[in-house]
Amino acid sequence: MGLDMHLYSFPKIDGMNLAEIRCADIHLSELEEEKGKLYDKIKVYIKHFEELGFSWRSLRTEVAVWRKANQIHHWFVENVQNGNDDMCSYEVSKENLQELYNSCVNVMKRKTPHNELPTRTGPFFGSTSYDNYYYWEVDRTKTILENLLKNFNFETHYMVYCADW
């Protein structure tokens, strides 16, 4: 139990918006059984995953994960979710990632972390101290974002942030 945070990727599919793609992902089994026009449209985007003896198919791919990095979650709540800490999913732009990356760089220079990436209290959100774990998560996030900014294709894929606890 605690704050779990994820960035997911969904393919951009002609004639479908992000909400429709996410709905298709949720109902993938039913769509596959029906073998209708919608399934024909999305089937080339379906990926097969296997982990720990389980297998599944999905349009969604996990691209980053954090646990109890409440300072990173706080940034997403304030800068992507319009202040709503509601466990819903939100689309993230390349510009959003660049801003968060810049904040991580500034924090790692030990520039006022409580102003740049303040911690956030919440149910099982972890420590709110500006300690080694705080800086470790910020540095890890910087590395994740550096890779995504260099390699993620925002022209062909959506990026979505969600957190739960």
Image: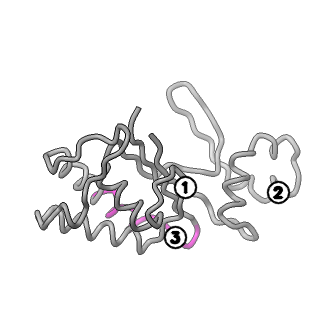
Q: Residue at x 64, y 66 (%)?
A: 12
Instruction: Residue under label 1, please give it.
Output: 89
Q: Is residue 45 left or right of residue 61?
A: right
The residue lying toward the viewer, choosing from 111 and 109, is 111
Label pair 3/2, CB-CB below 8 angstroms: no
Instruction: Name the kind of residue labelled 2 in the image.
Output: Leu
| Helix, strand or loop for disc 3 | loop
For marks 1 and 3 on the same chain, the one whose residue lies earlier in the sequence: 1
User: Is the residue 76 above or below the residue 128 in the image?
Assistant: below
Q: Residues within 10 Å of mark 1 (few under 14, many from 20)?
A: some
Looking at the picture, how far across and down is residue 149, in whole percent?
Answer: 38, 68
Q: Quadrant of residue 112?
A: bottom left
Q: Is residue 29 left or right of residue 153?
A: right
- Mark whose residue sits in front, 1 or 3: 1
Looking at the picture, how far across and down is residue 52, in whole percent?
Answer: 50, 27
Marks 1 and 3, how far apart in space? 17 Å
For marks 3 and 2 on the same chain, the one whose residue lies earlier in the sequence: 2
Tag count: 3
- Which disc, if any, is residue 154? 3
For the record, the magenta segment spans 143-156
Marks 3 and 2, how far apart in space? 23 Å
Q: Residues within 10 Å of mark 3 (few under 14, many from 20)?
A: some
The residue lying toward the viewer, choosing from 97 and 12, is 97
| Helix, strand or loop for disc 2 | helix
Instruction: Residue under label 2, please give it.
Output: 38
Label pair 1/3, CB-CB below 8 angstroms: no
